[in-house]
Image: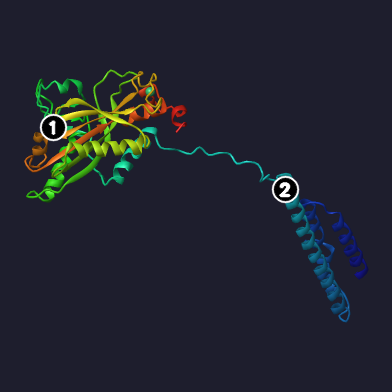
Amino acid sequence: MLEDLERAYQNALAELDEVADQDALEAWRVRHLGRKAPLMRAYGRLRDLPPEERPQVGRRINAMRDHLQNAYEAKAHALREAALRRSLEEERIDVTLPGRPKPIGRLHPTTRTIRHIVRIFQDMGFQVFRSREVETDEYNFQLLNIPPHHPARDMQDTFYVRTPGAQEGETPPVVLRTHTSPGQIHAMRFYASLNPENPPPIRVVLPGMVFRYEQITARSEIQFTQVEGLVVGRNISFADLKGTLNEWARRMFGQHVRTRFRASYFPFTEPSAEMDVECFLCGGKGCPVCKYTGWLEVLGSGMVHPVVLKNGGYDPEKFTGFAFGMGPERITMLRHGIKDIRFFWSNDVRLLEQF
Ligand SMILES: [Zn+2]
């Protein structure tokens, strides 16, 4: 009996050497270590042996079984290692290849210009004052010294919202703001409310979206942004206006840029002026963008009208102030040679990717 088993054992070891994959290994296990394997069946036949031989044969069978079990596990390990090496070889990743680029979002050119403008004023001690986009007619026009039927309204036709119950022909009282200027009233009334007897001085910029009812063309859109500025205090003069805006222009367009002021008219400032900067594209020599004048109009400004100061809660006998407003889209177009204002809203990444 032991001789047969020794033969089967040697046979099993020889077969194991030939095993080359997992399936063959499993078949080998069933054949030589399974319940029907000669070695396993031998345990049942021990009782047929004379009692004095049983311990010795039993020990030998145990030794052969343990050895086959160990050999099986060693083989299984070797096969797994080989499979791993093969897959590493075949599916090797070349870590030196450049990665696939991920598109990175960026700020809209108008947003960048607004932030640039605002940052300069913040450096000069201005605070940002956010104001609402939906306004009453009172704030958008009347409190800014633009009464009903004033001609300035014709240039700022806007989107009127009829309130429930309003009669046909009645002036609808709610509008999308046509300029950031109603924020001046909100800012003044807010600061005045802090101390009505002796209102604090004000130094704010008011960036935001404005809306007008316009024929959309390369030069005009129904919505665009403005940055408004307001300074109110005692003894604020036109010299402060010029000094502040000249300093802003130098920080915005370059230390040596020249500016000029031209008399203008706005209902809510008196006197009023437009500010031009020397064309930063041609250095003042004249080019198509500045229409060969050498100057670019960048903002409107003026001393706050006494009526507006009063409406804001500031006594015009004690306080003066100046205000200004500029168009970030226009400045962005000038700086980057963008020919069509509609590009800002077309969501075409070919434009946006350039910034
Ligand atoms: Zn020019």
- Reading the image, the residue beneath label 1 is 144
Q: Secondary structure at mark 1?
A: helix
Q: Is residue 16 left or right of residue 22?
A: right
* Residue 276 appears in the picture as rendered: yes
Looking at the picture, the colour scheme in use is rainbow
Of the numbered discs 1 and 2, the one sitting upstream in the chain is 2
Q: Amino acid at mark 1?
A: Leu
Residue at 47% x, 27% y is: 350
Residue in the picture at 92% in, 64% down: 7
Label 2 belongs to which residue? 87
Please say if the residues under marks 1 and 2 sit with CB atoms less than 8 Å apart.
Answer: no
**Residue 84, horizontal then vertical, whole percent:** 73, 52
Question: Badge 1: few (under 14), some or many (20 or more) residues near its Cα, within 10 Å?
Answer: many
Q: Nearer the viewer, mark 1 or mark 2?
A: 1
Residue in the picture at 6% in, 50% down:
197
How packed is label 2: few (under 14 Cα within 10 Å), some, or many (20 or more)? few
Q: Quadrant of residue 81?
A: bottom right
Query: Is residue 35 visible from the viewing direction of this image?
Result: no
Tell me the residue at 36%/18% (across/down): 292
- Compared to residue 49, the image places residue 99 above or below, namely above
As rendered, which of 278 and 181 lies closer to the eye? 278
Q: Quadrant of ligand 1?
A: top left
Q: Position of residue 220 (x, y in %)?
A: 30, 21
Residue type, numbered disc 2:
Ser
In percent of width and height, residue 183 lies at 19, 37
